[in-house]
Image (cartoon, rainbow, N blue to C red):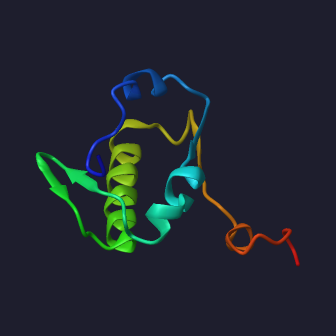
Amino acid sequence: MIDQIDKMAPRWKRADILIFNTGHWWAHGKTSKGKDYFQEGDEVHEKLDVLIAFRRAMTTWGKWIDENMNPARTRVFYRGYSAAHFRGSRCME
């Protein structure tokens, strides 16, 4: 679901370092072509543009971070994929 954070999220609040790694999910062949389903609440979007879905998911993530994490205590990182990985080439080429 693109409008909810994982049910394990309360455990993350005690972390010193928190890394969100969504590279594999968003780079999946079907997802990158916009052919996956995206769920928001009780509604399943069968044809939601992947960029819109990604924006909504990142908004959910960012809002959760802002409301639940203490920046003086926890370092938060977001990890995605380099565009070079989509082309099947090596980084920095």
Viewer-side residue, 59 vs 37: 37
| Residue 88 x, y percent position in the rendering | 76, 70
Residue at coordinates 35% horizontally, 44% vertically from top-left? Answer: 64
Q: Position of residue 65 (x, y in %)?
A: 41, 45
In the displayed structure, 80 sits above or below 77; it is: below
Position of residue 15 relative to residue 29, above or below, is: above
Give the vertical position of 91 relative to 78 (above or below): below
- Residue drawn at x 39%, y 29% is 9
Residue 92 quadrant = bottom right
Q: How many numbered discs?
A: 0
- Residue 40: % across, % down: 20, 52
**In front of the other: 7 or 26:** 26
Identify which residue is drawn at 39% across, 24% down: 8
Which picture quadrant has residue 72?
top right
Q: Is residue 29 left or right of residue 52?
A: right
Q: Quadrant of the C terminus?
A: bottom right
Residue at the image point whose x is 15% and y is 46% from the top: 41
Q: Is residue 59 left or right of residue 45?
A: right
Single out the residue that lies furthest toward the bottom.
93
Q: Is 82 displayed left or right of 56 in the figure?
A: right
Tell me where residue 67 sits by quadrant.
top left
Depth check, front residue: 42 or 10: 42
Furthest-left residue in view?
42
- Residue 50 position (above or below residue 64): below
| Viewer-side residue, 25 vs 2 | 25
